[in-house]
Amino acid sequence: MRRNCGMIRCEAAPDALAQADQAVPTNAASFSASASSLSALEQLKTSAADRYTKERSSIVVIGLSIHTAPVEMREKLAIPEAEWPRAISELCGLNHIEEAAVLSTCNRMEIYVVALSRHRGVKEVTDWMSKTSGIPVSEICEHRFLLYDKDATQHIFEVSAGLDSLVLGEGQILAQVKQVVKVGQGVVGFGRNISGLFKHAITVGKRVRTETNIAAGAVSVSSAAVELALMKLPEASHAAARMLVIGAGKMGKLVIKHLVAKGCTKMVVVNRSEERVSAIREEIKDVEIIYKPLTEMLTCTAEADVVFTSTASETPLFLKEHVADLPPVAPSVGGLRMFVDISVPRNVGACVNDLETARVYNVDDLKEVVAANKEDRLRKAMEAQAIIVEESKQFEAWRDSLETVPTIKKLRSYAERIRAAELEKCLSKMGDDIPKKTRKAVDDLSRGIVNKLLHGPMQHLRCDGSDSRTLSETLENMHALNRMFSLETEISVLEQKIRAKVEQTQK
C-alpha cells in the first residue's frame, strides 16, 4: 500500500531554511569573509518564527522500491549487509548528515538520515548514491521517493508492518528491519534518532501482526515465486516437473518449504556447502532433497525444468552463453526451461530471455501473483493503519521530548559563563596569593550554588515523551526559560553543528 501524501519523486523547491542553508560556508575563510553581511547562519537563525522547530534536524528517507524503480536500478544501488557500517560512516561524513541507516532488500533500497538541512542533505545523499552506484543523479531523481519527518516515520512503520511489501503482511521484512538495528549497534552514525526510529518500527511490526489478521494467509516472496512457477507450468506437469533450487539460505529454504507444500516430493538443491541442506533435510521429512555443490550447477540445470535462484552473488550465475547449449526441456512441461530469480542483484541475466528455449522471471514479475484478492488486502491494511497512526504519534512525542536538550545545554552554558565571570572577579579582589585550598573552596561553592539553582528548571525540562500532558508542560517550560534567560542569543545548536562539520571536512 502506498501513500501519495508527502511523497515526492523529484526534489521539491527548497523552503526558507533550505534557501538560507544553500549559502552555508564550506571553509573557515568564508566564515570570516562574510562577517560584514548577513551570514547564512544568521539567516538560519531568523528565517522562521519558531527557531526551535527550525533548529530541529529532519528525519529524511531517500528510497527506491519495487513500486517506483525497476529491478535493474535497484540491483545497482543494493548495498550488501556487510557494507552497511561503511555506508553509514560515509553518509555521516557528508556536511549536512548527522545520523544514517541503510535498508537494502530485494524489493527496496532506502537510506534513512537525520539531516541538518532537508534540501542540502537530500542533494548530498543523492550524489553519494550516484557515486556508489554509477547511476546518473537525474535517473535516480526520476525513480526515487522522498519522505520527511512524520511521513518518513509512517513509511518505515508501514514497511515493518508489511503494508509496503509486494506481498501484504509478509514476515521477512520485519526480520530485515531488526537486522538494521543489529548491524547498526555500535556504529558511529547510527544515532539516537535513527536507532529510536527503527526500534519503534520493530515494535509496530510486531504489534500489527499480533493485533490484526494481516499475516493470515499472507504469502512471502518465496511462496509467490513458487506460485508463479506453477502458474506458468501446464497443470498436468506439476507433479512431474524437475525442480532445482540454487541457494539454501533463508529465501532458498522457504522456496523448498513451499514446493513441498504444493506437493513436490523430490528436488535438487545446489549450495556452497552441504551443511545447510542437511539441516533442511532433517527438518523436512519424507521428501527427497538431493545436495549438489556449486561446481555441478550447470550439470544440474541441464537436468531441471524449473530453476529457482536465491543467492547473495553480486554477479550473475547464468548468462546467455551458459544456457544456450543446455538440452531442451520436454514439451509436457511447456518446452521452456524456467528461471525464477528472486535475488537482488539478480542471479540470472536478462539476456537469457533472448533464447527461445528459456524464460526468466524476477521479483518484479511476482506482481502478477499478488494482484489477486486486492480488496481483502486493502481491508487488512486499513486495520493496521489505525495502529500505525497511534504509534507514529508516540514516536513524534518522544522526538519532541528531545527538543529540550538544546535548551538544557544553553542554560547550563549561560549559567557557567556567569559563574566563571563572577568567580574571576571575586578571586581578583582576594589578591594573587590565595591558597589553592581556598581557591578550590570558592570554586566549589560557586558550582554548588549554580547546580542547586538549576536543579528545579532542569527537572522541568526532562521528559521521556510517554505522557502527552507532561510533554506539553515540558515544552511550555522550555519556551518560558528561553524567554526569561534570553537564550535565543546563545549560539544556536544548528550553528554549532554546521561549524563542527566544516571543521571536520578541513582536517
Image (spheres, rainbow, N blue to C red):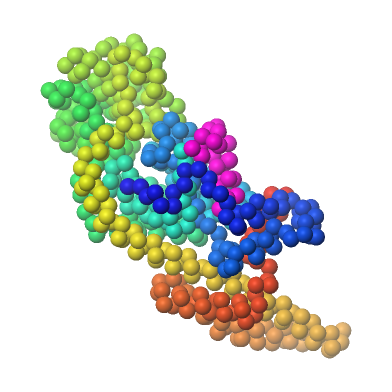
Indicate left or right for 76 with 38 as reference.
left
Query: Magenta residues, as a range?
Result: 118-142
Residue 330 on the magenta span:
no
Q: Measured from the top left, where is residue 35 in percent x and y?
A: 79, 60
Where residue 466 sits, quadrant-wise, is: bottom left
Q: Nearer the viewer, residue 217 or 322?
A: 217
Using the image, determine if residue 146 lies above or below residue 431. Answer: above
Work out which residue is located at the far bottom of the displayed protein and give it: 430
Q: Residue at x 32, y 52 (%)?
A: 161
Q: Residue at x 63, y 76 (%)?
A: 411
| Residue 349, visible in the rendered structure | yes
Q: Measured from the top left, where is residue 259 in percent x and y?
A: 20, 33
- Chief secondary structure of the magenta span? helix
| Residue 189, visible in the rendered structure | no
Q: Nearer the viewer, residue 468 or 75?
A: 468
Using the image, determine if residue 179 lies above or below residue 257. Answer: below
Q: Residue at x 73, y 59 (%)?
A: 39
Indicate left or right for 53 with 167 as reference.
right
Total marks in image: 0
Work out which residue is located at the far right of the displayed protein and give it: 432
Where residue 342 sits, quadrant-wise, is: top left
Using the image, determine if residue 369 lies above or below residue 292. Answer: below
Residue 120 on the magenta span:
yes
Work out which residue is located at the far left of the displayed protein and give it: 236
Using the image, determine if residue 470 lies above or below residue 286. Answer: below
Q: Measured from the top left, where is residue 426 in percent x and y?
A: 79, 87
Q: Measured from the top left, where is residue 343 in percent x and y?
A: 37, 33
Q: Residue at x 39, y 66 (%)?
A: 394
Indicate left or right for 197 with 337 as reference.
right
